[in-house]
Image: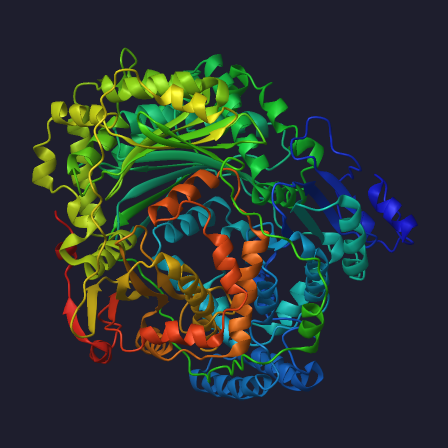
């Protein structure tokens, strides 16, 4: 082992006799030591079987983030089974020959029959014969459920304090991710290696339905049709042209045989990478990875045979319909990763749009010549795209808005920007890289992307240095070269899209049997681990709190970089003064003193300082962030912007016109309607949405009034939170203005919820594929001493893939893609709590899904084994998931809001260790008999409205009823 480990740590791996797989694998260069100047301190290694390992230690918290990436995404799908990579992503959560089963050899008989039946289904077109095949599959599936242990991967991980278990599929990659405590590295490695060595695609039938629901969710979203059309036209004849989720026809005709073949072809160790970031030692991690993952067998990789991407011979325009705001998307093909022009194009994209001071940001968004516009790009392994989209204002056509965007992008070709702009872009890119160092997620993403994009780590980690060498001439050259007349334009016009109808099939629910456990899961659960002691937040150690003339400041040290964050909150919001929120909106369009709005944006961007103002229902404030050396200048500009806003003539009028136009679009947008419906059903006439301005009120606004309200942002006592390198007294001194007479903030109104005397169903019609459902009931005022009860209830009922609601609604019956429930506690003393449930489900499944969720709330399936899973999860969270330095000030203020003067978690941790099923039953029993409100946004024509009404009095709200305009 010592010889092998030395080989793993060295730059040159010791492979077994060449069996041909090395030469076909395009494996990256190894790095035994971090490169000079690499902020992530990444090393690159190779296991004996070809798995590439990226390691980036970060000892800030006792946790590790893992991404396992495979060079197999949607672009690798078989042409007759598109969506295969995504289907497979779902199935790799179903277990293996050892995990997720009581007896694989016995269940294997039915699994093989199911696989054969799906092959029959794949070639069958007769509806009645297909129905018979489905019935046969269902019968065999029931035989499998005698042995299957659904959700066992999540159960094991949850009990150890693992979080964030998920996966994603993109064109070039599929990635499996989870975060775990540092003392469970061995358990993670053992489970993941087993997961990829012998996966078993059991319970496929219910997962097909889950993928259908995901498709429904995408089709109801505002961008699915736009992006599908764009990629189809830009990459005709290439796999990039096919939607990631696959075609509807292929989704309806899955093949398990083809899925196993896809797995066997692509899920090879020499085609995979493991990226770890967090609290571990390289040598220990490598030895463990070799011991567990090293047994996976490498094979030669088949050459990729995608056709070349044809150049556009002429402009292409496509129209799609959607019930929402109109937009134009314009896109050009550019270059793949590793192309010599990639860096110049990257800088060009940031010159065009960087969120602050790009050409599009200033000439279109800041100037309000359109409702909104943004530009971005993506570099894939075989191509690249440069994309802009623009939203027309009310009274403006899509064509007019697009013309303004194209005119702005022409400035790139003309060189209508400066070398100083490029310096600012590089500075802000450097800042973003510093923030990435704080995040383990950002680290592992960079490492896995490096692998799947065939981008050597030495090149990826040197991007900042390369961007510094890009000149204005480089940007002008690539703009002229790539932003030509041949492009794809997609216009999204208002109208009803043609949505494929997915019918709910009949199949028998899966038997969950929560007490089941595979022998392998028992073995993993018994693995010893040295307990990690909780790291509580201690005053004057982790943070310092000081009273000041303006109120109070809470400060924490930043041990990682020179980036500060500073915010100031006043307990006064729209509920106290609606004009304050409108003033904050206009403030975003204002300059400061002698600086115009454009000049201010450029100045802030050149400093690397971000500045914002915000206004919520019960509070308002501002925030600053950036390099520590620029704090004072940023604060000076912020104060000048509030007290001496430089607002160009006509700015307010343009803003009002855009807001009024947005009011029309809000009544078409699903997400906006859903929020308004939920707020009305929960809060009634106190809905925050009803605090918004009507069209008439907007037209009556006066600039002088709003300027006075801007100055008023600095006139109130409040609370400051700071993270950086300065001492608390220094921060307090910087924030204190001599002679300022600040007003005390008014009392905050408590949040309360509507309490109907009888159950009700609040329904709003919208033509859509899914129903968006929310269930709720008020449950008394916040009791801070019962926060642990709230936590246990939410964890047990809705905490992850193995929770009651997810298992019963999605895993066992596939009634919804989104299925969550829990307890929503008030944010402040005096606020009310509420029971919550959320569903996103196909319309014809709505009644059954709602009925089941109501039953689960009234009579949850109690089981000691489930409570133990929740208890272990909560205890491990306390032990292994301490607050980060940036989270501490906000947490301290949150504790103060509910009456705690110090960290309340030690007491909760102590109580959680002995939390019993009887205690849980006593709390959960409060939910039985609650007067529930079911809120449904969906299509009346596809819903069984009569069946829906059995859940309570049917109250139908028109969209217009939900808004004040």
* Whether residue 98 can be seen here: no
> Which residue occupies the extreme top position in the image?
594
- Which residue is more in the foreground, 775 or 121? 775
Residue 651 visible somewhere in the drawing: yes
Q: Is residue 85 above or below residue 448?
A: below
User: Residue at 55% across / 84% down in the picture?
Assistant: 141
Which residue is located at x 18 percent, y 46 percent? 664
How far across and how far down the image is residue 773, in percent?
A: 30, 66
Number of numbered discs: 0
Q: Quarter of the image containing the N terminus?
A: bottom right
Residue 548: x %, y % from top left? 35, 26
Q: Quadrant of residue 902?
A: top left
Residue name at image x 34 percent, y 58 percent: 825
| Left or right relative to 53: residue 329 | left
Residue 504 against residue 272 in the figure, above or below: below
Name the spot of residue 171 as percent of width and height, x first.
Answer: 56, 50
In this view, the residue in front, 765 or 95, is: 95
Task: Name the residue nearer the viewer: 484 or 268.
Answer: 268
Q: Quick check: 927 above or below 739?
A: below
**Left or right of residue 444, residue 740 in this image:** left
Q: Quadrant of residue 10?
A: top right
Please say which color scheme the image uses: rainbow
Relative horizontal placement of residue 307, taking residue 603 as reference (left or right):
right
Q: Where is residue 240 shown, x and y percent of the image?
A: 53, 50
């Amino acid at each position: 082992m010592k010889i092998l480990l030395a080989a793993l740590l060295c730059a040159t791996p010791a492979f077994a006799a060449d069996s041909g797989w090395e030469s076909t694998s395009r494996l990256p260069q190894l790095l035994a030591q971090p490169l000079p100047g690499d902020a992530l301190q990444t090393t690159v290694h190779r296991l004996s079987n070809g798995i590439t390992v990226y390691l980036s230690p970060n000892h800030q918290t006792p946790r590790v983030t893992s991404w396992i990436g495979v060079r197999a995404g949607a672009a690798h799908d078989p042409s007759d089974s598109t969506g295969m990579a995504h289907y497979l992503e779902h199935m790799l959560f179903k277990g293996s020959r050892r995990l997720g089963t009581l007896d694989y050899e016995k269940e294997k008989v039915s699994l093989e029959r199911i696989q054969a039946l799906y092959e029959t289904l794949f070639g069958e077109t007769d509806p009645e014969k297909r129905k018979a095949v489905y019935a046969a599959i269902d019968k065999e599936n029931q035989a499998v459920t005698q042995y299957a242990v659904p959700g066992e991967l999540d159960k094991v991980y949850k009990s150890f304090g693992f979080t964030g278990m998920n996966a994603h599929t993109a064109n070039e990659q599929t990635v499996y991710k989870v975060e775990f405590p540092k003392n469970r590295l061995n358990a993670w490695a053992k489970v993941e290696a087993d997961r990829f060595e012998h996966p078993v695609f059991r319970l496929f039938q219910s997962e097909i339905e889950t993928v259908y629901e995901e498709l429904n969710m995408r089709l109801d979203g505002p961008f699915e049709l736009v992006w599908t059309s764009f990629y189809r036209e830009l990459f005709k004849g290439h796999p990039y042209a096919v939607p990631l989720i696959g075609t509807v026809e292929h989704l309806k005709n899955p093949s398990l045989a083809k899925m196993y073949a896809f797995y066997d072809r692509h899920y090879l160790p020499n085609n995979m990478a493991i990226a770890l970031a967090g609290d571990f030692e390289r040598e220990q991690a490598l030895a463990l990875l070799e011991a567990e993952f090293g047994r996976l067998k490498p094979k030669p990789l088949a050459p990729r045979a995608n056709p070349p991407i044809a150049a556009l011979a002429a402009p292409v325009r496509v129209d799609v319909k959607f019930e929402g705001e109109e937009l134009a998307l314009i896109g050009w093909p550019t270059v793949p990763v590793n192309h010599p022009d990639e860096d110049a194009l990257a800088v060009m994209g940031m010159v065009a749009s960087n969120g602050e001071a790009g050409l599009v940001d200033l000439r279109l968004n800041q100037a309000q010549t359109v409702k909104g516009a943004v530009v971005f790009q993506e570099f894939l392994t075989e191509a690249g795209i440069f994309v802009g989209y623009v939203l027309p204002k009310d009274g403006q056509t899509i064509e007019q808005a697009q013309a303004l965007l194209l005119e702005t992008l022409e400035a790139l070709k003309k060189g209508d920007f400066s070398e100083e702009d490029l310096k600012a872009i590089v500075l802000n890119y450097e800042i973003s890289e510093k923030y990435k160092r704080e995040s383990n997620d950002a680290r592992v993403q960079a490492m896995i992307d490096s692998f799947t994009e065939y981008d050597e780590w030495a090149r990826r980690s040197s991007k900042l240095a390369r961007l510094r060498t890009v000149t204005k001439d480089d940007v002008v050259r690539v703009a002229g070269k790539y932003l030509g007349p041949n492009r794809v334009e997609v216009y999204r016009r208002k109208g009803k899209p043609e949505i494929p109808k997915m019918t709910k099939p009949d199949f028998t629910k899966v038997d969950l049997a929560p007490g089941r456990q595979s022998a392998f899961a028992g073995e993993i659960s018994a693995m010893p681990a040295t307990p990690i002691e909780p790291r509580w937040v201690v005053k004057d150690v982790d943070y310092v709190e000081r009273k000041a003339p303006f109120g109070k400041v809470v400060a924490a040290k930043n041990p990682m970089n020179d980036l500060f964050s500073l915010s100031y909150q006043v307990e006064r919001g729209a509920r106290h003064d609606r004009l304050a929120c409108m003033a904050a909106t206009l403030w975003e369009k204002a300059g400061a003193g002698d600086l115009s709005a454009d000049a201010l944006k450029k100045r802030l961007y050149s400093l690397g300082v971000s500045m914002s103002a915000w206004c919520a229902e019960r509070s308002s404030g501002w925030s600053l962030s950036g390099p520590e050396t620029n704090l004072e200048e940023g604060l000076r500009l912020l104060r000048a912007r509030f007290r001496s806003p430089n607002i160009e003539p006509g700015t307010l009028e343009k803003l009002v016109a855009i807001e009024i136009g947005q009011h029309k679009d809000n009544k078409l947008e699903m997400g906006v309607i859903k929020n308004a419906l939920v707020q009305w059903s929960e809060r009634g006439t106190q809905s925050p949405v009803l605090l918004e301005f009507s069209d008439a009120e907007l037209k009556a606004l006066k600039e002088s009034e709003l300027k006075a309200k801007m100055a008023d942002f600095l006139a109130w006592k409040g609370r400051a939170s700071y993270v950086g390198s300065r001492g608390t007294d220094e921060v307090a001194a910087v924030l204190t203005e001599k002679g300022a007479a600040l007003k005390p903030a008014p009392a905050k109104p408590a949040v309360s919820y509507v309490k109907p005397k009888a159950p009700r169903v609040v329904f709003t019609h919208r033509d859509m594929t899914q129903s968006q459902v929310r269930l709720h009931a008020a449950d008394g005022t916040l009791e801070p001493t019962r926060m642990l009860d709230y936590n246990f209830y939410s964890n047990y009922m809705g905490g992850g893939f193995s929770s009651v609601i997810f298992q019963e609604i999605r895993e066992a019956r596939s009634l919804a893609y989104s299925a969550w429930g829990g307890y929503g506690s008030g944010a402040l003393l005096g606020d009310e709590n509420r029971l919550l449930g959320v569903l996103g489900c196909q319309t014809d499944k709505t009644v059954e899904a709602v009925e089941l969720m109501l039953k689960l709330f009234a009579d949850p399936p109690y089981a000691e084994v489930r409570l133990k899973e929740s208890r272990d999860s909560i205890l491990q969270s306390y032990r292994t998931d301490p607050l980060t330095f940036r989270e501490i000030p906000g947490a301290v203020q949150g504790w103060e809001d509910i009456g705690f003067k110090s960290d309340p978690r030690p007491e909760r941790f102590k109580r959680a260790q002995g939390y019993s099923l009887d205690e849980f039953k006593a709390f959960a029993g409060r939910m039985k008999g609650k007067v529930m409100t079911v809120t449904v946004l969906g299509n009346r024509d596809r819903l069984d409205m009569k069946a829906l009404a059995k859940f309570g009095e049917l109250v139908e709200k028109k969209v217009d009823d939900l808004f004040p305009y």
